[in-house]
Every structure is written in C-alpha cells, then in structure tokens.
Amino acid sequence: MLWMAVGALVGLILGMIGGALGWPSIDEILVYAFFIIVFFTFVGGIFKWIFRL
C-alpha cells in the first residue's frame, strides 16, 4: 500500500515537471499509438482481402 502512494507521488511530480517543460502527456502518446495500430490493421485487412489465396 505504501508503494502505491510513493508511485502516485512520483508520478505526480514527474507529471508536473513534464507539464511545465511542455512534454506530451501519456494519453496523447497512447492516442497516437492506438491510431497507428488501427491504421496498420485496417490496411493489412484490406491487403488480405484483395490478395486472397
């Protein structure tokens, strides 16, 4: 339980420092990663449909 509180405090401190320095937040990074994964999956599905064996 103590480690969870320590982790939350460390995350809060790093988040405040990162926000002050203009670093992108983790949700912005995850949204872009999600869109890239979905795009490649969609393109791969199209190619699989076009080039059926």
Image (spheres, grey):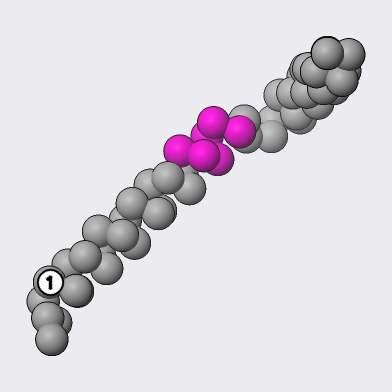
Tell me the chief SS of the magenta region: helix
Q: Can residue 20 be seen in this view?
A: no
**How many numbered marks, from 0 up?**
1
**Of 5 and 35, which appears nearest the observer?**
5
Q: Measuring 19% from the left and 74% from the top, which residue is drawn there?
A: 47
Can residue 9 be found in the magenta stretch? no
Q: Provide residue 1's location: percent of width, then percent of height.
A: 83, 13
> Is the C terminus in the top left, top right, bottom left or bottom right quadrant?
bottom left
Task: Find disc 1 in the rendering and name its residue.
Answer: 49
Q: Is residue 10 left or right of residue 46?
A: right
Q: Which residue is drawn at 80% across and 18% down?
A: 4
Residue 9, image quadrant: top right
Q: Label 1 sits on what residue type? A: Trp
Q: Which residue is nearer to you in this view: 7 or 14?
A: 7
Image quadrant assignment for residue 39: bottom left
Q: Determine which quarter of the picture holds residue 44.
A: bottom left
Q: Where is residue 34 in the image (x, y as percent from the top left)?
A: 42, 45
Counting from the top left corner in percent of width and height, residue 29 is at: 55, 40
> Which residue lies at the image location 61% right of the left edge and 33% below the top edge?
26
Question: Start and end of the magenta stretch?
Answer: 26-31
Q: Where is residue 14 in the image (x, y as percent from the top left)?
A: 81, 26
Mark 1 lies on a secondary structure that is helix
The answer to whether 49 is drawn above or below residue 9 in the figure is: below
